[in-house]
Amino acid sequence: MADAGTPHKPLGLLAELTHRCPLGCAYCSNPLALEPRNDELDASIWGRVFTEAAALGVLHVHLSGGEPGARRDLVDITAHAREAGLYTNLITSGVGVTSRTMRDLWEAGLDHVQVSIQDSDAVSSDHIAGYRGAFQRKHALAAEAVRLGLPLTVNLVVHRANIGRIGEMVDLALKLKASRIEIAHVQYYGWALKNRAALMPTAEQVTRAVADVEELRDKHRGRIVIDAVVPDYHARFPKPCVGGWGRRSINVTPSGRVLPCHAAESIPGMEFWSIADHSLPDIWANSPAFNAFRGTGFLPAPCADCERREIDLGGCRCQAFLLTGDARATDPVCHLSPHHALVTGLAAVQDDAPYAYRRI
Amino acid sequence: MSDDDAIAGDARPRLPRGVRLTHSEAQGGWVLIAPERIFKADAVAAEILKRCTGQVTLAAIVDDLAATFQAPRERILADVSKLLIGLAEKKLLEL
Ligand code: SF4
């Protein structure tokens, strides 16, 4: 492996504390085969993971899921992350974290809260989440976080059912007193892939949405930070997925499998190691999965002699596999990929079928 | 706030909740961490930021640094102001 010796240091750890979640969002990128509760790591093992992660260089830990609020020991887990010196970010749907828990988390040293919203309209929001009343609970949680002085990010996943209301959703984020809004388009893995045709916006909708976001940025400058990720299927170049395979981030599943990105298990034949058997530094340096696509040496043409190779690292491995059957291939989102027509083809397929709600 | 706006001497600068100065051996020193953002702090910046607790006035911070590093007060004041104003603009510091 050309750059197996490169001392990349991870900066972020995505800790998937559980796959359990009261919501059933059709765009969920969790795998179809969810890990059961009995296999979940206990708080003390998470503590060890956090200590080892900090020693490796990790600064941010994202406590996620599923819904992390489904864990009764969430406060202990958060305290362990803070003891390890990590910056702790809670990623929640807002359902399952009570005001009481929020106060305990604050006392445990939680640094930041990220709450997802599905839509600006209560009915549509609950429909997308497959959970009646979720919209109200999100409001309550956001209000409590702000009251405690915690910085709040509103996370918005955009797809065909809500893409026309980005402006209203930014207004909602302002009303919730968020300091930042993160707008991302659906990534088609796991449950989202199953629902792709029902979620996929049209090219015109996407173009309009990108323009909307630019206008909103100007309109709200100084009041709220708007971070937007351009949707993959409608782009000309791919993104360096998770900042590069095995370069910046680590993902630990509820049962302790350690992945280079949260969708990595969608690539067959990979050997993932578990923190039950190895230390995190050992996994980072030596696990076959982390070394599989480190660097750019494995990339075939057209990436092999493309000047953007070190910028986008050939895009996303999971997507390359999903669409071409070869995880080493150029991400077909790239317009230079020989398989790019697949992406333009899929981006054109819209079907108003009912959602297949994610269920455990 | 423009560059030549001075910070009041009795301001008590502090890092807001959600912004934290931390030492990471692996990352080679001090880092200022905010949601989704990380800034490396060099030795001088770290010494300044460690003192931004919300308890101490700007004037006292500058006196302390001038004594600790045996440097002219005016120069320290200029360096400190530049750093703090820049961070305040990015909402990483409260003045
Ligand atoms: S050919 Fe490869 S390296 Fe070049 S832009 Fe496309 S994905 Fe990036």
Image (cartoon, rainbow, N blue to C red):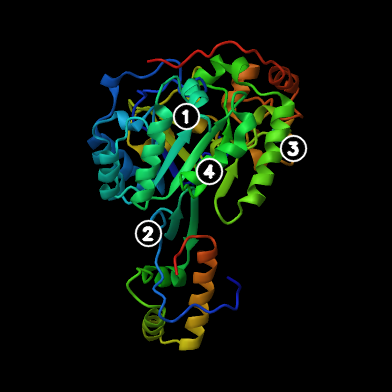
* Lateral position of residue A185 relative to residue A204, left or right: left
Element on which disc 4 rests: strand
Residue B22: where, in percent of width, then height? 38, 58
**Label 3 near ligand 1 (CB < 8 Å):** yes
* Residue A341, image quadrant: top right
Q: Amino acid at mark 2?
A: His
What chain is tagged by disc 1?
A: A
Dot 1, crowdedness within 10 Å: few (<14), some or many (≥20)? many
Marks 2 & 4, CB-CB < 8 Å contact: no
Q: Is the residue under label 1 in contact with that under label 2 (CB below 8 Å)?
A: no
Inspect the image, locate mark 1, and give the three-letter code of the amino acid beneath it. His
Task: Give percent across and percent down for residue A256.
Answer: 34, 28
Q: Is residue A188 above or below residue A215?
A: above
Indicate the secondary structure of the residue bearing disc 3: loop
Number of the label disc, if any, that sits on residue A107 = none
- Secondary structure state at the residue bearing disc 2: strand
Real-space CA distance between mark 3 and mark 2, rounded to the nearest whole angstrom: 38 Å
The mark closer to the camera, 3 or 2, is: 2
- Can I make out residue A246 in this image? no
Which residue is depicted at the point 36% across and 46% down?
A145
Q: What residue is disc 2 on?
A: B23
Would you name the residue on which mark 3 appears?
A306
In this view, the mark in front (1 or 3): 1
Relative to A80, say whether B82 is above or below. below
Say if disc 2 is inside 8 Å of ligand 1: no
Which residue lies under the disc numbered 1?
A262
> Circle 4 sits on which residue?
A181
- The amino acid marked with disc number 3 is Cys
Is residue A286 among what the camera can see?
Answer: yes
Q: Earlier in the sequence, mark 1 or mark 3?
A: 1
